Amino acid sequence: MEEQKRGISVARLIDRERFYKEKALRLEKNFIFANERISALEEEVRTLTQAYEAREKEYHDVRAQFDQIKALYETLKEDYAKETANNQQLTEELLQYKNRFGTDADRNALDEKVKGFERLLNDMQREINEKDRELNHYRKRVTILEKRLKLHAATSLNEPPSVDADFIQRSAVEAIAYMDYALIDREPRAMVRGNLTIENKGSKALSTPYICFRFNPGDAAILKGRIKTWETVETEINDRDHWEWVYLDNDWAKEAKERGELWIAPTAPFAILPGERVELNDWQIPIERRFYEHLTVEVFVFFEKNDYRIKGVNKIALNF
C-alpha cells in the first residue's frame, strides 16, 4: 500500500512537471510575440518622429506612455527569466530524486522531498499564472498604444478649431450637415436617437471631416452609439473602405469636453467627393430629466485641409 501511494505521488509530480513545462513554453512564446510587437512599435515611433514634428507635444505624451509600459514589460521579462531558472533547477533536482527512488533506504525522507516538491510546484504555478496575467495586461496596453500611434495622423488636428468663428462661403467648396433625430420621452430618463449626414454640395472634394457636438448645458454632453474610444478600436486596416468613428482624446479635445463639446473623427483620412455623403448613424443622447429643464445640441463640421467649416442646418432643442 505504501509503495502504491509513493508511486501515485511521483506520477502526480511528473504530471505537474509536464504541465508546468507546457505552461512555461506558452509563456515564452507569448513573450517572443510581445517582444516582436515592441520592436515593430519602436520602428513606428521612429517613423512618426520624422513625419509629425509639428505635433511634437502630443507625440511625446504618447511616447512617454509607451516608455512607461515598456519599462514595466522589461521588469516582467526579468521576472520571467528568474522563474525559468528556478524551474530548471527544480527539474534537475526532481530528476535526481526520481533516479534514486527504489534504491534509497530512507523512504520517509524521500516522501517528504516529494511533498516539498509538490508544494514548490504549486507556488511556482501560482507565480507563473500571475506573470501570465501581467503579460496579457501589458500586451493589451501595448496594442492600444500601437493603434494610437498608427492612427495619429488621421485623428489629430494641429490646433483646436473655434466653433464660434465666422463661417466663410466658397464657390467651389460647399457642404451641408443635418441631423435626423427622434425623442423618446420617458420618466425619469429621456433619450434622443439620431443620425448625422454630411453631404458635399460643391464641385471640389472635401477633406477628412472633424465633427463637434456642442451641448448646452455643457454637463449634459454624453453621446453614445457606434463611436469608439482608442481602447475599443478594432480596425487593423484603415483606408477609405475600412474605418470607424472615434472620439478625439488629445489635450484640447479633453478641455473642449469640459465646455460641453464632444469631438469625433474617422480613424482614416479620406475625401468626400462632390455629390457624396458621409453618415454618423444611430447615436444616442441620454437625458436625466430631473437635472434639465431644457437642452440644446448643435453640430459643427470642420474640413482642415480645405480650411472650411460649416454649422448644421438644424439643431436639437428640447424643453421639459
Image (spheres, grey):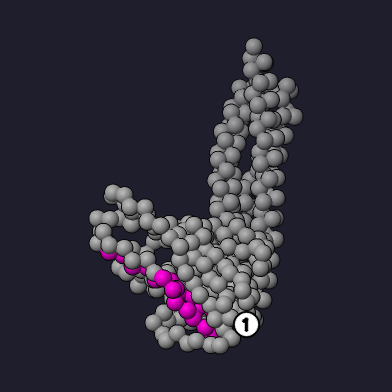
| SS label for mark 1 | loop
Q: Residue at x 47, y 69 (%)?
A: 178
Where 136 falls versus 113 (above or below)?
below
Q: Residue at x 66, y 71 (%)?
A: 44
The residue wearing badge 1 is: 204
Q: Nearer the viewer, residue 319 or 309?
A: 319
Which quadrant holds the N terminus? top right
Residue that sits furthest to the top in the current view: 1
Sort mark 1 into few (<14), some (14-19) or many (20+) by Cα contacts within 10 Å. Answer: some
Instruction: Determine if the magenta segment contains residue 211.
Output: no
Tell me the magenta residue range. Answer: 294-314
Q: What x and y, as percent, mark residue 165?
A: 41, 85
Q: What x and y, as percent, mark residue 126?
A: 55, 40
Place residue 286 in its image quadrant: bottom left
Q: Is residue 137 left or right of residue 193?
A: right
Q: Residue at x 37, y 56 (%)?
A: 183
Say if residue 129 shows up in the picture: yes
Say if residue 253 shows up in the picture: no
Q: Main secondary structure of the magenta part?
A: strand
Q: Is residue 183 left or right of residue 51?
A: left
How many numbered marks have been drawn onto this rendered protein structure?
1
Which quadrant holds the C terminus? bottom left
Q: Nearer the viewer, residue 253 or 162?
A: 162
Q: What x and y, as percent, mark residue 256?
A: 40, 73
Q: Residue at x 67, y 51 (%)?
A: 30
Q: What x and y, as percent, mark residue 14?
A: 69, 30
Place residue 142 in its image quadrant: bottom right
Give the residue type that dot 1 points to. Answer: Lys
